[in-house]
Each structure stands twice: as structure tokens, then as C-alpha cells.
Amino acid sequence: MHVMLSKEVDGDCPDPFGPCEEDEPPAPFSKVPAVRWRDWRWQIKNRIATQEVLEKLLVLTEEERASFLDAPGRKLPIAITPYYFSLIDPTNPDDPIRKCVIPRRQELLMGPGEAEDPLGEQADSPVPGLVHRYPDRVLFLLTGRCSTYCRYCTRSRLVGDRSHTSSASSKRRWERCIEYIRSNPRVRDVILSGGDPLVLESSVLEWVLEKLSAIPHVEMIRIGSKVPAVLPQRITPALVGMLRRYHPLYLSLHFTHPAELTPATRQACERLADGGIPLGSQTVLLKGVNDDAGTLGDLFRGLLRIRVRPYYLYQCDPIAGSAHFRTRVEEGIDIIRGLRGHTSGYAVPTYVIDAPGGGGKIPILPGYVTGRVEEGIALTNYAGGNFVYPEATVPVAVTP
Ligand SMILES: *Cc1c(COP(=O)(O)O)cnc(C)c1O
């Protein structure tokens, strides 16, 4: 499969403070003036959010159309930035990006073992909007909003524009979360997530970053975001200039498919990397979207080219209505086996299952340790060869 980086960006934009020159409005948005297209607020304001607008842009499949019949029962809203929509081939009902953002009938069906909150985050929440599961780090859910909603969202129970509260009440909620972190000296790592923290206004995000970085025991802050993939226009030099004042700051980005690696996304990631922000990516393994070693290998190597290190590959969480997205775990193991050793180790993320019921992330590895033999530990390598590692034992005294 071809990695979509063919339209290379030559160095920086000619105007270092301007938007990406390469980011021209494509069909069906070619009538939109380029200055609008490159404005992240325009992208948010003009999101595709209703069946009516979708039907104007492509022919919905029967499964997609059926998902609108029970629309009042829908929990996860629909929203797709025009930019992200433009990555979809409208003539292909199997387009991978399309499956991620346009609902299908199966989304409304609750399967066995599925739950609204499969990870049991509610039970690990000491104050609203904060999940404290591991001893030394917390997940701080800043906002319920995203620029684009992924149909397989693990927090579909929480997200959506309707959960958007007044800025005064968010600030009060954030203050309680910050107070919790301040009074828990074991918390040395704070992960800002949601929703997508990068849809907040920079000044609002900075207020949180400033408060957190002033806490002496907070050693690092991470932001989880899909913005570089769905709204790269948001990654302006001004935003990066603000973020870089809060080092050590890490970004965990969400990427799904090599089709997301466009010139605009490349520029967004390079700006962040140039700001000294280490970039990792998290990918959900999705049936019919990215569930083969070829596609994921292309994605992971493509990410390395734009200085994003693949961090986690997630088995899809059993949220309500996720059966059509979930692969068998063996398929994930086979994909990791197809990558490890065959390509750069940097391109191989850790495959994890976030255990239902609050068990946290559990790494899933192909069986490289095959047992113990008399001489030591028996191992198998990427090509299927067998080896023994002799563990250190008490040396046998050599008689003179
Ligand atoms: C994923 C997660 C973290 C961070 O885990 P790392 O393995 O450190 O990246 C922290 N808290 C919660 C609740 C999480 O789900």
C-alpha cells in the first residue's frame, strides 16, 4: 500500500507565521476561499453534522442510512470537519476514514459483554472529570467536545457538544481536579484528555497548563489529541509557542490510517516536534479499517517520517455498539508478529487491551518466550528461529 506522503512539503511554509500553503480546499470544498479553509474556527463551524448535509456530499449506504432512523436514541453526536471529510473517497462505501466517522446501523446494537463504561472509569473517579487508576498518574478529562467524533470512541458516554457547559462551571470543575492533584503528591504525571483538549481556546488551555505546572510534584504533562489528524489547521505557530512554555510536555496523538498522513498533518506534526514536544501516537485496531499488517506498517512508518513515535495499538474497547469494529485478539497478535523484527523497532507500538472493569492497560505479546530448557530460557525470533539464552548461574569453580 502506498503511504500518502507523495506530496512532500519542501521545508517550512514560505511565511513561517502563516497557514500551510499546501492546504488548499479540495473537492467538494474547492469553492471555499483558502483563508477560510485554513482557519480552524471555520473548520469547526462548518462541520458535517447531519444526515441532510451528508446526503448532499455522498450517497449513504443502506447501513449508514438505517443508523439515522433511530437518531433520537443516538448518544454519540456526528461531527466531521470538512478537512477530515475531504480525505474520504465518496465513491467508495468501504473507505476506511468513512467507517470511522459515519455511523452505521450496528452502532445502535448492544452486543454481549459490551457496556457504556467498559473500562470502569466512573469507579476510579475521585472527583468529576478525573480518573485516578494508576498510583503516579491521572487522566484529567478537560472537555467533552471534539472537532470530529470517532464512532468507536471509548468515551462515547461522555463526549458531545451537549455536554458543553458554561465556561464558569468548567472552571469550577477544573479547580476541583487541580486541587485533587495538588493534594496528592504521588501524582507526577497528568494526562489531559476528554474530548479533545486542543479544541479549547489557547488562553483557556494555558490557564490549566499554568496551574498544573506550578504544582511542584507534577513532573510532566501529556495532552491526548486527534487534532493533528482531523483539524491540522489548529496547530498554528502561536499555539506551539504557547505549549512549549510548559515543558516537559508530551503529546499523545490519535492516528488510524495512512490516509491521514497528508501534507497539512505533516506540517502540524513537524511544527509540534520543532517546538520540542515529543509526539507519540495511539491507534485503535479496527475491523475493515486498519486490521492488516500492511496498512498498519505503512501508518507506523509514515508516522516516524513525521516524527511521531507509535506508542500504543489498542484492542478496540467493548463499548456499546462496537461489534462491527472489533477484531479477534489473535489478529492483533499476528499484526505485531508481522511487524516486530521485520521493520524498525520504533515503528512497533505496544499492543494493549485496556482491561474491562478497570484493570488498566495490559500488554499483549506474541509468545517469544517458549519455555525453559536445561541450558536456559528458550526463545523464538521474528523469523521463527529457535534460540537459548543462558542465564547467569553460580560459576563452576575451575580446579587448578
Ligand atoms: C492510559 C491511561 C493512563 C496512562 O497510561 P500510560 O501507560 O502511562 O500511558 C493513565 N490513566 C488512565 C486511567 C489511563 O487509561
Image (tube, helix red, strand yellow):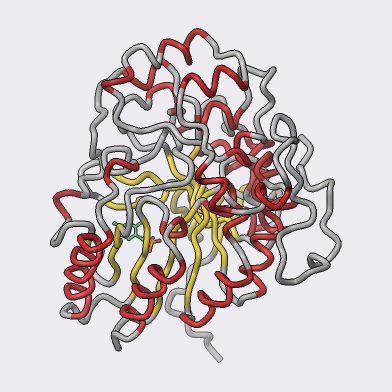
Tell me the quarter of the picture where residue 186 sits. bottom left
Work out whether residue 163 or residue 5 is closer to the camera in this orientation and state it: 163
Query: In the image, what residue occupies the spot 46% across and 31% down?
Result: 49
Instruction: Using residue 39 as the reference point, say whether residue 131 is left or right of it.
Output: left
| Rendered-image quadrant of the N terminus | top right
Tell me the quarter of the picture where residue 160 sits. top left
Residue 180, image x and y in percent? 17, 72
Residue 65, image x and y in percent? 46, 12
Query: Eyeballing the image, is 225 above or below 331?
Result: below
Work out whether residue 387 or residue 280 is closer to the camera in this orientation and state it: 280
| Rendered-image quadrant of the C terminus | bottom right
Query: Eyeballing the image, is 113 above or below 366?
Result: above
Residue 344, image x and y in percent? 69, 57
Work out whether residue 157 or residue 387 is closer to the camera in this orientation and state it: 157
Tell me the quarter of the picture where residue 190 sits. bottom left
Furthest-top residue in view?
62
Does the rendering let one see residue 167? yes
Q: In what quadrant does ligand 1 lie?
A: bottom left
